[in-house]
Each structure stands twice: as structure tokens, then as C-alpha cells.
Image (cartoon, rainbow, N blue to C red):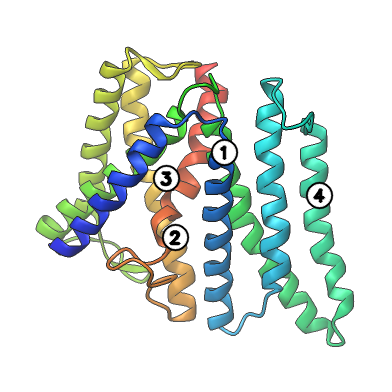
């Protein structure tokens, strides 16, 4: 195993864990962090597409995507009757913002002399908005779920589950991986690694259920059965998220979305599984835990 990669991952955890477990989620620093991750992730994704010859309206896509991310933040605050200087965003206003973001990218086709290139750019730009800002907005919904004077436990919970599932997959995969999970997309992923992810994630869920006395956060109780189900679902959905990003990278022949962090790639490489796991948890809460 790569010891340097493990040490770097632990250092990142030493920063993020206190940030997620100590800072009240309603503080503006949370919004800044959410915008930063969404912005860099979107920029990296457009970089992948551009490397593969798919042109995008990068600045416009990032800007319009961040508008939706910010609108999601204020919408979540509004549900708790909180606002900055009276600024509120209702559910209807939020979806109007999303509609404007999507339509504005379609209208940009008219600015291209070559309509074929305009269409390709529009499709790539909208794909980036859906893949990063839209999916990332569910991390914000989880972050601001519950008592806003407390840390964003639900978002921390999903990130912890996914990172432990990734760790279990890496540990089992490097030691016991023999049967390839998706050789044409990600040759290093194995069924043994997936099983390791399920084992690690299930143990984390049981531990969370015990320590929290049966709560994901202050607003969402869950039983041991739900903890076990989520311990199974997280690695499955997260692996799909990993494979989707791997598919994008393999399609354009790029190893990592970025090289800012040794062994871990860029922001997109670190949150690819979370982009799928957060919406899954949000839907699960809405259907089974409310």
C-alpha cells in the first residue's frame, strides 16, 4: 500500500473532521466551503471534457452552477426561517433559478456561428452543471438538515461513510483483489474491494448508530436495520459514482481530474462517490426516515 497516500489522506481528515464536527452549520464559512468544492470540481470536470476535445463554456457553466449552489444554501436556510439580511429563497424560486441556469446555456448556442459546435458546447456545459453543482447541492441539503446551531452531522455522516467505504475498498482490493469489477472502466477495482467497502461502511454505521443513540443527526432518527441497509447501499452507490468518473476519464484518456493532491488526484476524484451518495441518502431520508 502507498504509505504517503495514506498519510496525506489522514492529514486532510485531521482538517475536515474538526471543521464538520465543531463549526455550526449556519455560519457563512460553510457556504464558502461548499462553493469552493463545487467550483473547483466543476472546473476540473470541464477540464476533462476539454482534454477530450469536447468544448464547453467553462466560465459560464461554473458561474451559473455556483448560482444554483448558493440558491440551494439560502433555500435550506429559509426552511428554518433564517436569512442573511432578510434574503430568502423559496422552493419555487430555487427551481426557477435552476430553470434559468439550464435555459441560459441553451440560449448561448445562438452566440456560435457554427451551430454544431454550439450544440456540443451546450451539451458539455449542461452535463457539468448536472454532474457537479446539482448533485453537490444535496450535500448542502444534508449539511443544513436539522438544528443549524450544531455542526452539519448528516453531511459529515455521508462523507465519513463514503471515505471509510473507500478505505475498506482500497485495503481489501490491494490485499485480496483478484476478481475485476469493471475491467474496461477501472481495472484496479475488484469485487473483493467492494466487499471490503461494505464491511467497513457497515461497521461505521453500527458505530454511528450506537454513539448517536439512533440518530443520523438531531432531526433524523434511524434504527439499527436502517443503519445496516445504509451500510450496504453507500458502497454500492459510491462505487457507481467512482465508475462514472472513471468512465469520463477513460473516455478522454486522463488519469486524474487534477494532480493537486498526491495519490488522491483533484477535488472531483475525492468527491466522485459523495456526489452519488448524498442524493441517495437524501432520498432515503425522505422516503423511509421521515
**Disc 2 vs disc 3: Cβ atoms closer than 8 Å?**
no
Q: Which residue is mark 3?
A: 237
Of the 4 image quadrants, the one containing the N terminus is bottom left
Give the mark nearer the N terminus: 1 vs 3: 1
Q: For the view shown, which residue lies furthest in the front direction?
A: 85
Give the mark nearer the N terminus: 4 vs 2: 4
* Residue depicted at x 25% and y 44%: 197
Classify mark 3: helix, strand or loop: helix
Classify mark 2: helix, strand or loop: helix
Q: Which residue is mark 2?
A: 267
**Disc 4 vs disc 2: Cβ atoms closer than 8 Å?**
no
Q: Position of residue 12 (x, y in %)?
A: 31, 51
Structural crowding at the residue carrying mark 4, measured as other residues with C-alpha within 10 Å and reported as few (<14), some (14–19) or many (≥20): few
**Disc 4 vs disc 1: Cβ atoms closer than 8 Å?**
no
Q: Which residue is mark 4?
A: 99
Query: Which one is closest to the eye, mark 1 or mark 3?
Result: 1
Amino acid at each position: 500500500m502507498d504509505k504517503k497516500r495514506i498519510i496525506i489522506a489522514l492529514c486532510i481528515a485531521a482538517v475536515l473532521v474538526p471543521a464538520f464536527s465543531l463549526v455550526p452549520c449556519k455560519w457563512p464559512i460553510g457556504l464558502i466551503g461548499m462553493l469552493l468544492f463545487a467550483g473547483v470540481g466543476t472546473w476540473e470536470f470541464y477540464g476533462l471534457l476539454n482534454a477530450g476535445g469536447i468544448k464547453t463554456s467553462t466560465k459560464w457553466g461554473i458561474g451559473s452552477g455556483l448560482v444554483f449552489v448558493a440558491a440551494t444554501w439560502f433555500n435550506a436556510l429559509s426552511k428554518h426561517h433564517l436569512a442573511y439580511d432578510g434574503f430568502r429563497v423559496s422552493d419555487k424560486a430555487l427551481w426557477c433559478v435552476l430553470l434559468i441556469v439550464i435555459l441560459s446555456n441553451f440560449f448561448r448556442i445562438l452566440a456560435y456561428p457554427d451551430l454544431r459546435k454550439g450544440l456540443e458546447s451546450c451539451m458539455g456545459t449542461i452535463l457539468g452543471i448536472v454532474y457537479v453543482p446539482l448533485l453537490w447541492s444535496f450535500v448542502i441539503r444534508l449539511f443544513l438538515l436539522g438544528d443549524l446551531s450544531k455542526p452539519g452531522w448528516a453531511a459529515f455522516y455521508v462523507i465519513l461513510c463514503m471515505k471509510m467505504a473507500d478505505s475498506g475498498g482500497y485495503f481489501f482490493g490491494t490485499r485480496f483483489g483478484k476478481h475485476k469489477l469493471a475491467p474496461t472502466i477501472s481495472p484496479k477495482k475488484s469485487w473483493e474491494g467492494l466487499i471490503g467497502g461494505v464491511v467497513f461502511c457497515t461497521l461505521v454505521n453500527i458505530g454511528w448508530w450506537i454513539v448517536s443513540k439512533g440518530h443520523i443527526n438531531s432531526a433524523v432518527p434511524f434504527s439499527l436495520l436502517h443503519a445496516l441497509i445504509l451500510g450496504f447501499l453507500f458502497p454500492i452507490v459510491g462505487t457507481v459514482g467512482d465508475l462514472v468518473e472513471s468512465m469520463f476519464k477513460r473516455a478522454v484518456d486522463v488519469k486524474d481530474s487534477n494532480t493537486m493532491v498526491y495519490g488522491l488526484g483533484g477535488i472531483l476524484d475525492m468527491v466522485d462517490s459523495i456526489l452519488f451518495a448524498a442524493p441517495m441518502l437524501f432520498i432515503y431520508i425522505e422516503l423511509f426516515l421521515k
